[in-house]
């Protein structure tokens, strides 16, 4: 993706186009979550809130081969699942095989941030995703001018939902 920016200078009521600069914007960032065997349950819940259909579901048994053996108890666990979110993002996940150990479900180093397009959408997403979870900051007007709330969902994933009426979606 790229944007074209034009730089202009105004002198004596005349605008002169000095340069046209094409700036390349980095590819999209899409969150990926590791689960302890409940990725499908969590993503079915996320799908009920966001809507849409899964772009992809791959189970461990789908990749089983003599070179890639899969334990019977892990055959139906999720190797990869993807749910389109919004206009161009994807929420992705997998189940971590038991042989690799447990995922820390109470980590607090990362959050998934949703930039809503309206207060109504922010409320819908906040209220839907936080069901059964722990609200850390109720959704409402923030001191910095946005409509903001944060919570840990029932699967231990931390979310921030925000609507900023001043943000136009443009860089």
Image (spheres, rainbow, N blue to C red):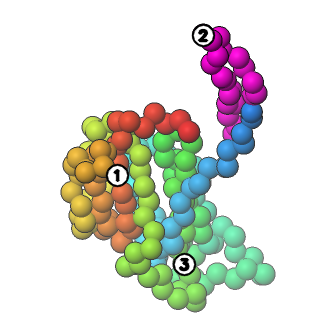
Q: Residue furthest right?
A: 67
- Residue 161 badge: 1
Question: Is 18 colored magenta in this rendering?
Answer: yes
- On the rendered structure, is 159 left or right of 23? left
Separation of marks 3 and 1 at Cα, in angstroms: 27 Å
Is disc 3 in contact with disc 1, using a CB cutoff of under 8 Å? no
**Residue that carries the numbered disc 2 in the rendered image:** 13
Front position in the image: 55 or 76: 55
- On the rendered structure, is 169 left or right of 20? left
- Name the mark nearer the viewer: 3 or 2: 2
Q: Position of residue 2 (x, y in %)?
A: 70, 37
**Residue that carries the numbered disc 3 in the rendered image:** 96
The magenta stretch is 1-20
Answer whether residue 40 is visible to the viewer in this image.
yes
Q: Position of residue 39 (x, y in %)?
A: 46, 67
Front position in the image: 39 or 71: 39
Q: Residue at x 55, y 51 (%)?
A: 90
């Amino acid at each position: 993706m790229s944007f074209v920016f034009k730089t202009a200078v105004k002198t004596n009521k005349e605008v002169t186009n000095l340069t046209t600069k094409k700036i390349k914007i980095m590819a999209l960032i899409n969150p990926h979550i590791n689960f302890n065997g409940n990725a499908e349950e969590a993503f079915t819940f996320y799908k009920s809130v966001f809507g849409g259909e899964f772009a992809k579901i791959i189970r461990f048994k789908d990749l089983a081969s003599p070179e890639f053996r899969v334990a019977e108890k892990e055959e139906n666990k999720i190797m990869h699942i993807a749910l389109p979110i919004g206009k161009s993002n994807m929420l992705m996940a997998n189940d971590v095989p038991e042989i690799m150990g447990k995922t820390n479900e109470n980590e607090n180093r990362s959050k998934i941030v949703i930039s809503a397009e309206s207060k109504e959408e922010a409320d819908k997403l906040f209220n839907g995703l936080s069901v059964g979870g722990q609200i850390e900051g109720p959704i409402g007007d923030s001191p910095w001018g946005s409509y903001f709330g944060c919570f840990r969902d029932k699967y231990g994933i931390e979310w921030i939902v925000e609507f900023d009426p001043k943000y136009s979606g443009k860089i």
